[in-house]
Image (cartoon, rainbow, N blue to C red):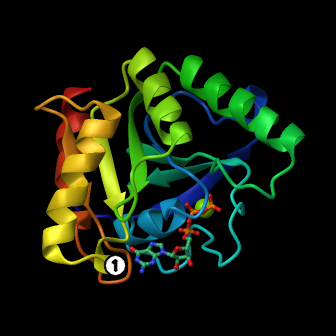
């Protein structure tokens, strides 16, 4: 897939602010700081379309990016950041589930996990939601540059086990720093868009 055009088309905290249903959507979920915004910039080949920050918990809205006037990538707010107050993490759950549950044009969700660590309890919960809504099956292991080759394959095995993935489910290691893995992910997204 060639990215010809990418733009932020909506920022939402509730359903009224979502854009229209005219394009298929692929959502990106993961804990705060896992690298969601960095992955979006890498995928869409734009340096700072999505805001990347050293301080976690930055993306607290649902951000919709129109790609090639064809489909949307949807950046969901990150979870699991301790300093985010309880009320915010509560509204976080409502915000995310409200979106996953009420979006007929949402065809897939990408679960992001940090390749260095075992998925957290919240990663597992998030992935269960994806399963519940039939959006599961695609995981991106972020920050692949931070582990050796042997750790990479060992940790991907661990991620598969902890999330309870099936054989046909896909895990793609990506590094936004080294700019690797995004071509493979784009190829998978292309196939999903054609099917879905
Ligand atoms: N080494 C390395 N660092 C990365 C990679 N991806 C992201 N980072 C760093 O991790 C930090 C968080 O990245 P973001 O893309 O902002 O993470 P996020 O998931 O969007 O975070 P929130 O918006 O807070 O939920 C930043 O300092 C990035 O530079 C990667 O592939 N390799
Ligand atoms: Mg972000």
Where is residue 50 drawn, in percent x and y? Answer: 58, 67
The answer to which of 12 and 28 lies nearer the viewer is 28
Residue 81 sits above or below residue 54 on the image: above
Residue 172 sits above or below residue 136 on the image: below
Q: Can residue 2 be seen by looking at this rendering?
A: yes
Quick check: is the Cβ at mark 1 less than 8 Å away from ligand 1?
yes
Q: Is residue 29 left or right of residue 58?
A: left
Based on the displayed image, in which of its 4 quarters is residue 52 positioned? bottom right
| Residue located 77% across and 28% down the image | 16
Residue 173 sits above or below residue 16 on the image: below
Q: Is residue 181 left or right of residue 41?
A: left
Q: Which residue is mark 1?
A: 146
| Residue located 24% across and 32% down the image | 165
Where is residue 148 drawn, in percent x and y? Answer: 21, 78
- Number of numbered labels in the structure image: 1
Based on the displayed image, in which of its 4 quarters is residue 163 positioned? top left
Q: Is residue 119 left or right of residue 169?
A: right
Where is residue 67 drawn, in percent x and y? Answer: 42, 54
| Residue located 56% across and 52% down the image | 31
């Amino acid at each position: 897939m060639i990215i010809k055009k990418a733009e932020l088309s909506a920022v939402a905290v509730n359903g009224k602010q979502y854009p229209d249903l005219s394009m298929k959507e692929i959502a990106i979920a993961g804990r705060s700081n896992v690298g969601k915004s960095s992955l979006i910039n890498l995928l869409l080949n734009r340096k700072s379309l999505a805001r990347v920050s050293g301080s976690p918990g930055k993306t607290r809205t649902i951000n919709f990016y129109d790609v090639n006037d064809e489909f949307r990538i949807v950046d969901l707010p990150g979870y699991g950041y301790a300093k985010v107050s309880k009320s915010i993490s509560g509204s976080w759950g409502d915000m995310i589930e409200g979106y996953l549950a009420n979006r007929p044009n949402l065809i897939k969700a990408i679960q992001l996990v940090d390749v260095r660590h075992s998925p957290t309890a919240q990663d597992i919960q998030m992935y269960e939601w994806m399963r519940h809504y039939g959006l599961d099956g695609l995981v991106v292991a972020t920050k692949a540059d931070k582990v050796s080759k042997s750790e990479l394959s060992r940790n991907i095995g661990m991620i598969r086990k902890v999330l309870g993935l099936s054989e046909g489910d896909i895990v793609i290691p990506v590094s936004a720093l080294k700019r690797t893995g995004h071509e493979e992910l784009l190829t998978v997204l292309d196939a999903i868009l054609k099917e879905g």
